[in-house]
Every structure is written in C-alpha cells, then in structure tokens.
Image: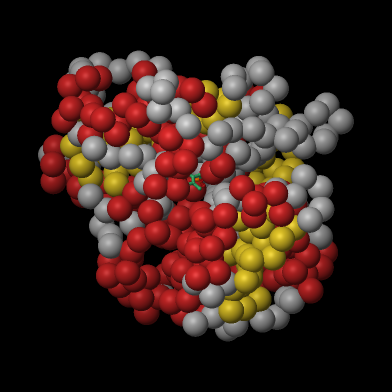
Amino acid sequence: MIAINEKGYYGEFGGAYIPEMLHPNIEELRQQYVQVMEEPAFQREFRHLLKDYVGRPSPLYLAERLSGHYKATIYLKREDLNHTGAHKINNTIGQILMARRLGKTRIIAETGAGQHGVATATVCALMGIQCIVYMGAVDIKRQAPNVSRMRMLGAEVRPATSGSQTLKDATNEAIRDWINNPVDTHYIIGSVVGPHPYPDMVARFQSVISEEMKWQLEEQTGRENPDAIVACVGGGSNAAGAYYHYLNEKEVRLIAVEAAGHGIHSGESAATSVLGTKGIIHGSRTLLMQTPDGQITEPYSLSAGLDYPGIGPLHAHLIASGRAEAISITDDEALASAFFLSRKEGIIPALETAHAFAALDKMEYSPEDVIVVCLSGRGDKDLDTYIQHFDRF
Ligand SMILES: *Cc1c(COP(=O)(O)O)cnc(C)c1O
C-alpha cells in the first residue's frame, strides 16, 4: 500500500525539515489541509473552477497515428488544453482556495521558467489577491515572455540576486518572505516538493488527472486501468497526478521520465533517480543531486521545467521501492520527439512533455498494451528553442 504516513513520509522519504520560525505556518497548514479539502463547499468551488475556468475534464485522446507507429494503443491525457497551457493550474486553483479558507490575503510563489509563476499570478488575479513571485535574476532575463505575462496579470516579480540567481535562490527568497509574514501570507509551492504537507496537498489537487483517466478509459476501452502511464518528472506534480489513483494497482506500470540533459554522466543533466543520493532539499528528505560533502549540484536540462536537482519524496519512494520505473532522456532525444509528435498528431508539446514521449522509444511493451502519456503542457513557450533546431529535424 503506497500512502503517506502521519508525519508526511512515503517510506523513508518526505517529512518537514524546516527552520523553527516556519513551524507555525507549516503546522497550521498541516492541521487543516485534509479537512478543508474534504469540505463539500470547498469541493464544489474547486470542481466548478476546474470545469468552467480551467476547461476540465481534459480530453483523453486516442492518438491513432502515434499508436500505428509504436504498435500499441496510445492515449494522450491532454493537460496542454488547460487554461494557461499546462497542468500547473490544477494545483494553483486548489491552493488559492485553500489560502482563502485559511484567511490569507497575500500570496507568494517561486518560479524557475515562469510557468508556475504565471499559473499563480492567474489565480491571484481571479481572486483579487496580492501576488508576489520570486524569480532568479538570471531566469528573469531568460524567460522574458513569462515575466511579462505575470506583470500583465498584476503580479509583482521580485528578482533573487543571490547565488546562481536561479530557482533555488528564488525558493530561498520566498521562504525568507514567509518567515517574515507568517500571519497573512500563503506560499503556493509549484510541485510535489517541499515540507509536508505540500507534497501530499499538491498530489491531491493534481489527482484530478488520474481520476478523469479512470472513467475516460472505462468509457473508451471498457476497463479503467491502462498497462502503463508515462509522465515526465521535474519535481513530479504532473506524474503524481497521473499516477495517483493507480498507485495501488500493481498491474499498472508507472514510468517516470527524467531529463538527462547532455547525457546522464556528462556532468550536465537532471537525472536525479540515477545520480541522486539521499539528502534534504527544500524541507524534505528525498533523492537529490549533490557532491559527496552535500553541496547541491547545479542541474542542467534544455527544458527549464525539468531543470531541478531533486525529485518529490513520493517519486523517490516509488523509484527506490521499484513501483515506478525511471527512464532518462537527453535534450536531443526530447527535441526529436517534439518534432515527431508535432508532425504525427498536430500537437506541439512543451519541451518537458517531449521527454515523456521520447520514452516510448525506450520502453518495452506488447502490441495489446494500452499506454497513457500525460501530455503535461503545450509547446508555445518553447517555440524559440524549437526554431533553433529546425535544420536538424
Ligand atoms: C513545470 C512543468 C513540468 C514539470 O513539473 P512537474 O511538477 O514535474 O510536473 C512538466 N511539464 C510542463 C508542461 C511544465 O510546465
């Protein structure tokens, strides 16, 4: 049975390793989150917004040309069709409603590529709540269109100017802000990472993905369970959502796809399940890429959403226990796969998502198998990157 325990552990991974000064904030959330989420009024509002604002249920699409090519039955779970273009909005809608129930009037978030920042700025605008997004100064330069989107939506984007001026520095700034504003502020974390209860709370909000997959598969194939579910893993929130209602269905294979960057052993990758060792990052005990003396290694992936040196504790447990299989995909393999999917199905995937599709070339399966790929997001944001590779594909 795969489930989180009272203290927030999946097996030996998880927990809440936080500075003393954050205890009141985390404790308030921990005591309330399950109860709040289970309130009928909360569920009504969450479901209503998922339906009419996000556009759910997202379709489960039988990709016939892809199925023909791979000689298996392949369905795509279309999170790319959600408002703002990815699965991230499922979580930010849930958390903004949680923040309101807890009486919070100010939202902070961290963002790397800007996708979570945009999803957070969107729901803050929707609710009329102040929004501050911390973002590394280097990322602000690299991700200009998303910075403009956040500003258009009324959010304040604050640069993090310490360290490498990227995601982990933005996270440190957000935590510092939260310590200084414990009463009125909620911190919206963007993936199944961070101290308990965040990984579980985010997984529950994203679990709508597999909840829909169950009835959609039943409707289309006559059975609820596929043979395999494939999803890319940065922190692991789209994967957690796609796996959630199948975690204890052992015959459903769970395939976690990570970014190998320039190659697993190139020194430039984000393949945490292969290179990671046990340690603590952003408040939880998990697998992370670090030097023997515990310095966090700079991760690398062409895809900004997979460029993270850890994985959520649920995924560390799924991989360590053998429940999930990890596959690593290089930048080039992901690019090839993005072009392939675009031309086979008329769907331009996010570069993160392209990693999941590339795994179809590496997995073993039989022709009777039904495989669901979580199409976590659309590729509009990655067009500039794709354009640079037009001559190669
Ligand atoms: C952010 C992002 C990811 C990676 O985040 P997870 O928490 O691992 O899901 C994957 N795909 C897309 C489209 C993203 O925007």
On screen, residue 249 versus residue 18, left or right, reads left
Residue closer to the observer: 266 or 233: 266
On screen, residue 167 versus residue 383, left or right, reads right
Q: Is residue 217 above or below residue 64?
A: below
Specify the farthest residue to the front: 391
Quadrant position of the C terminus in the picture: top left
Q: Residue at x 81, y 47 (%)?
A: 163
Residue 276, image quadrant: top right
Q: Is residue 282 visible?
A: no
On screen, residue 231 versus residue 47, left or right, reads right
Residue 174: image x %, image y %? Answer: 71, 63
Residue closer to the observer: 162 or 297: 162
Residue 374: image x %, image y %? Answer: 35, 40
Residue 135, image quadrant: bottom right
Residue 264: image x %, image y %? Answer: 61, 20
Residue 259: image x %, image y %? Answer: 54, 30
